[in-house]
Image (cartoon, helix red, strand yellow):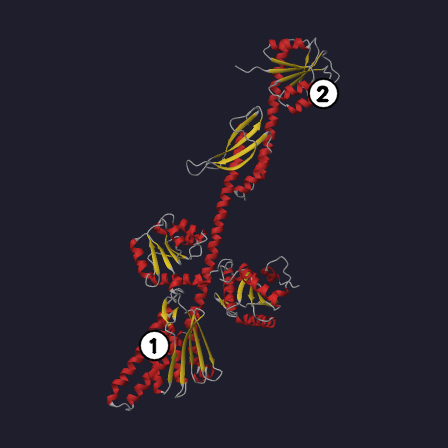
Amino acid sequence: MSATLVALLVGDDPRTLPFLEAGLRGQGWDVRTTATADEARGVLLSGGVDAALIDESLVDEEVGAFAGEVRAILPLVALLLIVRAPRLEVDPLSLGFDDVVLAGGDPAELDWRLRMRRGEVRRLGLTRERERFLRGVVRVADLVTPHADVPTLAATLAPALLALPGVEGVRVEIDAEAPGDPPLVVLEIGRLPVSGAERGTRLTDVPLRGLAGGRVQLSHRGEAPMDGEVRDALGAIVGTALSGARLFAALKDRQLRLERGYVDRHRKLSRVSTRLERLSEARDSFLALLSHDLRSPLAVVLGQVQLVEEGFVPPGGLPKVASTIRRQGERMLQMVEDLLDRYRRDDAVRSVSETGDAARIVSEMVENLRPLAEARQQSLRLTAPSAAPIETDIAAIREVLANLLENAVRHSPVGSTIDVEVTVRDARAVVTIRDAGPGFGASAAAGGSGAQIGLRASTRIVADAGGSLRTATAPGGGGLAVISLPAAIPQATASAIELLVGDPALREHLFGLLSTHWEVRQSESLDGAFERMRRQPPAVILLDQRVGPEAIAFLRRLKADAELAAAPVIALGDDAHELHDAGALAVLRVPVDGPLLLGHVRRALRLLGELPGPGEGALDVLTGLPTARALNLRMNAALEEARESGTPLPVVQVRVDELKRINHEQGWLVGDQLLLWLATRLRERVRPHETVARTDAETFALALPGRTLAEAEALAAELRDAIGRARPRLGVARVEVRVSARALDLTTLALGGESLVGAVGSGRES
């Protein structure tokens, strides 16, 4: 059964209005009457009126103005004008009325007219409302952009959805991915009913299209439900936009992961390229090295054979000669095998994989050469501490020491003294050899090209082993050779290696490899490992990805923890990219290469000494130099001290010219190699208390506290000339490098509220 229709009579004529009221009631209408326009407004605004009949004799307000006001407020109410004569001076339709009825007309005809006009008005009003809503939906579609994430899209949709005609509140929900979880509310704005629909308000659910599930809830005023096609269009627009936003976020995250992987691979390729360059240069000098190092034992062998052939050796001396030839032959064979083994390696980690005692090694080499020195009436004097632990390529260092000590004995005059001293200072073991010969410049000239080639080869061997070799002629005469080698990390510093491996056989194998060098703690699962490591932080963590499905999440948790983030993690697994992205320092495959693992552990322990302390800032990921922030933190105290004392604080700013052109023409890999090469050159030019930093993409800064501004200017000029002449080999070609270098005095820069690094970068002076 249909609901009763409501009609409102507005007027105060006692002759006609009661007749109309009785007729409408007889036709089944619910009739309400008001005498004035003000009373009619209250009834109309309260809602529920289907048709309004306004008497032309309304006394308190002009009839046309009142009809226009009602039409603007209630477009779905039918308006009829009550007249007493069929002819009118003004067209009622132009005033906003829908029809005209006579005051004394037939009630049945009046009922028919009211019902007909009410249906027409509602159909026309609903069409107009649908058009306005559809135009609002089109505006929503115009505002949607495919290049936005979900929060940005929600901020864009909020005002657009709330601006739809009649809409008072909006909620956008996406179904949860896991069953049982609450839906994800992407957007909630405006006024939404707490439960059900309030009076005059509808709550409409619009299903989303393009997603696994979700809806848009619209709280809006209106008598008719939302059109199905419009609702589907709105759901498709919002659902497609949210799908695009999710896809955009996923693509953006993938792009970020790819960029990180690209940077990581670039860095690794740069290191590999540098290693290949060094190997190429080492192999170029390989034959020269053999000719030089084999010359001495070969000369002894040939000399002994010549003495035997010429009959200068008595029969009783033949065993001694044979023993000498055998020892020298074994020595040559060992040298060849060591050199071939050395230059057969292609892994930089393997070249630093042994720990030894420099004092013991030097003592053994001196004792081996003592008979030769005594035959020349020379004295070998050794000064060494009880122990000088080193971490380097021991076999290579033995070659170099034998070469230098033999040269010292051979070139020193008869009856002279050769001093050999071993000291430990600044985390380095230093071996000093002083002889009374003509010095290295003269001996190289006297010895011919072979001596010079041998010196260069020895320098290269020591550099490859992580040390340095300096030779010179002593001020008082004689040769001076100084070998500086990296000291081994003490056991107390190394602390413990945390072994998180589930496979018992693999865990036992790794424990056997590591326990001979360090303390090792073992765990077969991740249960309780995090809390245990927080109580006793390890030096290095060795994590097998197969220890549990949450291994990568566990690694991310380690790197997010302030106490454990600095501990290097060496991972075992096949997902190298994902493990590196989670924070692993190195990733090895199973079965594990023992020497490679030991080399990575030692490299990780060395990095512990290079990591910045609290408040010191981070290191540049490409060059390993301090960043701009780290330089700022390190130099602020020195700047305050220099200003208080009135002394300068020089900084040399070095900028690579045309780095963008090099990257564009020859590729980013060559540009990265150039920056690595330049960082190495700059490190060599500073003293222990000075700092080299990379302040931006193409600029380096050398902070030189303690030097004068004139010294800094001389260093800047020297760097410009030396780097311009270098033409380093980067990849397959040599590249001309041009830099701009200038000296600045930080105490005279106008810093204002800016940072130290900002002043250095701009170079603005007061």
Q: Is residue 221 visible?
A: yes
Q: Is residue 291 visible?
A: no
Which numbered disc, 2 or 1, marks the residue closer to the eye?
1
Instruction: Tell me which label, 2 or 1, sits earlier in the chain.
Output: 2
On the image, numbered disc 2 is attached to which residue?
A: 64
On the image, numbered disc 1 is attached to which residue?
A: 364
On the image, which quarter does residue 754 sit in? bottom right
Position of residue 86 measured from the top left corner of the image (x, y, whole percent): 72, 12
> Which residue is at the far right?
89
Q: Amino acid at mark 2?
A: Gly
The answer to whether 674 is drawn above or below residue 210 in the figure is below
Position of residue 163 measured from the top left corner of the image (x, y, whole percent): 60, 33
- Please count the marks in the image: 2
Of the 4 image quadrants, the one containing the C terminus is bottom right
Q: Amino acid at mark 1?
A: Glu
On the image, which quarter does residue 188 sit in? top right
Position of residue 613 measured from the top left corner of the image (x, y, whole percent): 48, 59
Name the one closer to the observer, 376 or 494: 494
Q: Residue 268: which disc?
A: none
Q: Which type of secondary structure does the marked residue at label 2 adopt?
A: helix
Few, some or many residues within 10 Å of mark 2 (<14, 14–19, 20+)? some
Name the one closer to the observer, 756 or 396: 756
Specify whether 102 is left or right of 573: right
- The residue shown at (32%, 77%) is 331
On the image, which quarter does residue 662 sit in? bottom right
Specify whether 81 is left or right of 157: right
Distance from the alpha carbon under mark 2 to that under mark 1: 121 Å
Q: Which type of secondary structure does the marked residue at label 1 adopt?
A: helix
The answer to whether 471 is drawn above or below residue 538 in the figure is below
